[in-house]
Amino acid sequence: MTLAETKKLPSPVGESKTRLDVIEKVTGAAVYTDDIPFGPGLLHARVKRSPHAHAKILKIDYSKAEALPGVKVVVTGEDFPKRIGLYLVDKHIFARDRVRFIGEPVAAVAAINADIAEKALDLIEVEYEPLEAVFDPVYGASPEAPLLHPDMADYDVPNYIFPQAGTNIANHFKIRKGDVERAWEQCAAVVESEFYIPHVQHVPIEPHVAVARWDDDGTLTLWAASQSPFAQRNLIAKSFGVSQSDVRVIAPLVGGGFGCKAGVTMEALPVAIASKVKGRAVKLTLTREEEFFTNFVRQALVIKLKMGCDADGNLVALKNTMYWDGGASTEYGVNITRAGGYNSTGPYFFPNVHTDSLCVYTNHPIGGAYRGFGMSELHTGIEQTIDMLAEKMGIDAVDFRLKNCVKGGDIILTGMTMHPTGLNQCIEKAAKAIEWGKEAKPSSPNKLRGKGIALMWKAPSMPPNAGSSAEVKFSEDGTVTVSLGGQEIGQGAFTVMAQMAAGVLGIPYESVRVRGPLDTRYSPYEWQTVASRLTWSMGNAVVAAAQDARDQLLDLAADHWDEEVEDLDIVNGKVISYKSEQEMSVKDIGIYGLPNENFEGWKGGPIVGRGSFMPTYVTNLDFETGQGDRAVVHYTTGAQAFDIEIDKETGRIEVLKSASAFDVGRAINPELVRAQIEGGFIQGYSSAVYEQMLLKEGAMLNPSFVDYRIATAVDIPIEHHVDIIEVPQDDGPWGARGIGEHPMVPTIAALANAIYDATGLRLEGPPFTAEKLYLAMLDAGLVE
Amino acid sequence: MTIHTITCTVNGESEVVEVPAHWTLLQMLREKLGLTGTKNGCAGGECGACTVMLNGAPVNSCMVLGVECDGATIVTVEGLVKDGQLDPVQAAIVEAGGVQCGFCTPGVLISARSLLDRNPNPTEDEIKEALVGNLCRCTGYVRIIDGIKEAAKLNEPVVIKE
């Protein structure tokens, strides 16, 4: 094959290859955690939960439960003194001295079947003494509020999280750039706003499930629906006082995660219970009701903004104060607050910024990671306020954004220099797709019509040194197996990794397998499947591993042919020489090596490629100013826009057109990128129009699909225009950045701006239900 | 706990099953017959992940007792492949990119197959209506709906390609 011919061969990178896992998923063969058989010895666990938002535990009597035939063990917080947590180590597996939210685990039972375990729960008697509770993060941050974690100062915490001892503030992240107070004088217009973004739930269709077994040799095996087998190994080992290598986490395919299966949530419960019945596997599956409020939720946010620009419409100053409703534990939430802080301008350049991002303990469910954590909430405030300021200046909202949005080379709020970004193109594409600027009349006198746009940016929110690793091995048939530690949660990670490995190795995509299930005993290390970081970070590790294997193959062939590596290539599974035009199949040499001349010995051997990646350039930020050289690895940016009608008689929104444009650096698999954008947009739309956890005195009033509605097939805007922008990332594989979380970030704000355009009304926050909109229109005199 | 012995046809095979009186069809399929393709998402008839065909009609198998299925004909996702060939709804949803995490997929496929059995040429609204009981959190439904439209055009089963 000549060089010219090989150049014509398609690369699997950039092609929309069919998902690796799709045939098993459409035939029912795909194995999820609940599908693993454990035989008749399996014990079933149920959890006794707190009915109080805040109370002292006076006494727990479980003697009757223990005596019930079929019950094997009952555990309480007395048995497990150590705390657990990803960032701030503030959570007990079972409540000990007090309970802090409705649904907090207080005790648990393992029995021979779930019916008996459930019956035993009723026999556990717990006496409580109710305490004053905190349900409002603004009050919670005040000196008047009762302290929910009096021991906070003693909790372990990394050096970039700043708990304020003697308060309920578990993290206070600040940005101080320029001089905001003096800057207001330079402003031709200043607007102030306040929004409330309520609690919502992730709602994966697969409930949380975990099975734990401790063996007599002191080792633990945990099977879990998990985005984070390695983080779980680490946190559980620490909390139970064993070595990480004695904890083995096996993580099959995940039936939807969106962040709620990251870190450790309910998985520690069966681990704790199983520790008292060694040798028996203990299974805990959350009911759909438990799924709604006992695990991570998306915490609510109160955001107060003041924003000003000069007479030419240049943004001058931003003051942003955010009160995050962290809930009863902020082990993960402190980092959400941090991310909210260092992204707190949204994707705009401001010379003067003053941000206080406060993570506040409350007696609400525990706030955790939810698809782009902190970002939907933050942008809901920022993007509406940008519109308010543009309107006050009499500048078109798209022009105002094009003028002020962040551009490559800008010194952003943390002092970091912005890398090249295609945000301008995203704005133009999204605006064009909904015919921004073109007059659009309502289709009937009973309707109001409006258009809206919103931007977003988001960096992976993770520790500075979150790492990835990968291995590549050959089989006798010339196929390659990629081992990795990042999870397939539906986003298509395994497929994209296979494309990258194939692209580097010069073998067909169809010849690549990805090893599953993830297993911390055998899989290479990965921080977590979070932060839209796999395509970039794990991708770099897979590329390095494939390159390592490729180098070994080429060295072997060069030696064998007595040629230079530079003259060789691997094309379609064959090592070829452009010089001598010889070729041989990688199938023949990937394992067995090659004989020397006249079979006088052999060279080569089974090829194993190894690769790893870790960003080495992220710096800490100063506590007082939030300034540092490089706060984050990079930003994915984008825009969304709506053209809508609102029915004056019902308040119902009808989406006429909607559009997304995101800069993904490089689309390794364009159809998978589009699928992420479409699905994320609908998730965002669902949160904008339908979803809210109704919390009354800490109790969730709507913990079912009937009462907590998510978008169904009849609710969705069917046409969603998608543009993919590709301004490459300097350290991304083929220039790629992540896109998993970003598509739901601007949706609430874009819809709110369209609602304002149609009605002149800004609501305090989502969801923009038909009822809420109708009543607001009624109040405003828009309808009679 | 009373145990009943029932006879039913599951995916074309005649089965004799000993099932406790209070067990759901979902439990029976997963735990007695090893058919774990049918998923449990809510156990309350709200999410549709456990949809199977019972005597030709789609039902939430978490809302039917196993003992009610004596003499019944049941089709689960495992029964869609025939002679090594994908059902058109499977092939078309693969092609349309209508699968992400895959947890709702078995129920979606059964609802789709059942729709096309009743109505070989459904409108978009009829497709949406048929899917209203199948919650999906990943895809936003669009590619699922596109896939079912395409499946309606395919007459032949499709060979699984590896």
Image: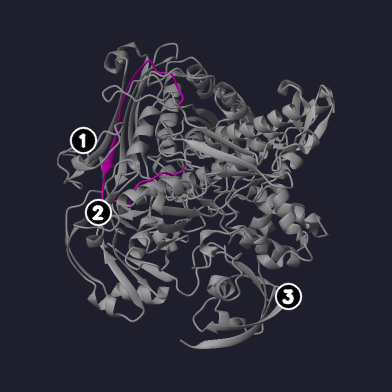
Residue, disc 3: B12
Label 2: how many residues lie within 10 Å, few (<14), some (14-19) or many (20+)? many
Residue A512 location, x and y as percent? 68, 44
* Residue at disc 2, secondary structure: loop
Please tell me whether residue B102 is drawn above or below residue A344 in the rendered image. below
- What's the mark number on residue A71? none
Query: What secondary structure do most residues of the magenta stretch adopt?
Result: loop
Q: Nearer the viewer, mark 3 or mark 2?
A: 3
Please tell me whether residue A281 is drawn above or below residue A444 in the rendered image. below
- For residue A28, what is the image quadrant? bottom right
Q: Chain of mark 1?
A: A
Estimate the spatial distance between the alpha carbons at disc 1 and disc 2, rounded to whole Å: 19 Å
Residue B45 location, x and y as percent? 52, 67
Residue A587 location, x and y as percent? 75, 42
Residue at the image point whose x is 37% and y is 14% from the top? A188
Estimate the spatial distance between the alpha carbons at disc 3 and disc 2, rounded to whole Å: 53 Å
- For residue A356, what is the image quadrant? top left
Residue span colored magenta = A347-371
Residue, disc 1: A164
Residue A284 location, x and y as percent? 41, 64
* In magenta segment, residue A700: no
* In magenta segment, residue A359: yes
Which amino acid type corresponds to the residue marked 2 in the rendered image?
Arg
In the image, A288: left or right of A237? Answer: right
Label 1: how many residues lie within 10 Å, few (<14), some (14-19) or many (20+)? some
Residue, disc 2: A100
Among numbered discs 1 and 2, the one appearing first in the sequence: 2
* Residue at disc 3, secondary structure: loop
As rendered, which of B111 and A617 lies closer to the eye? A617
Label 3: how many residues lie within 10 Å, few (<14), some (14-19) or many (20+)? few
Q: Are marks 1 and 3 in contact (CB under 8 Å)?
A: no
As rendered, which of A443 and A694 lies closer to the eye? A694
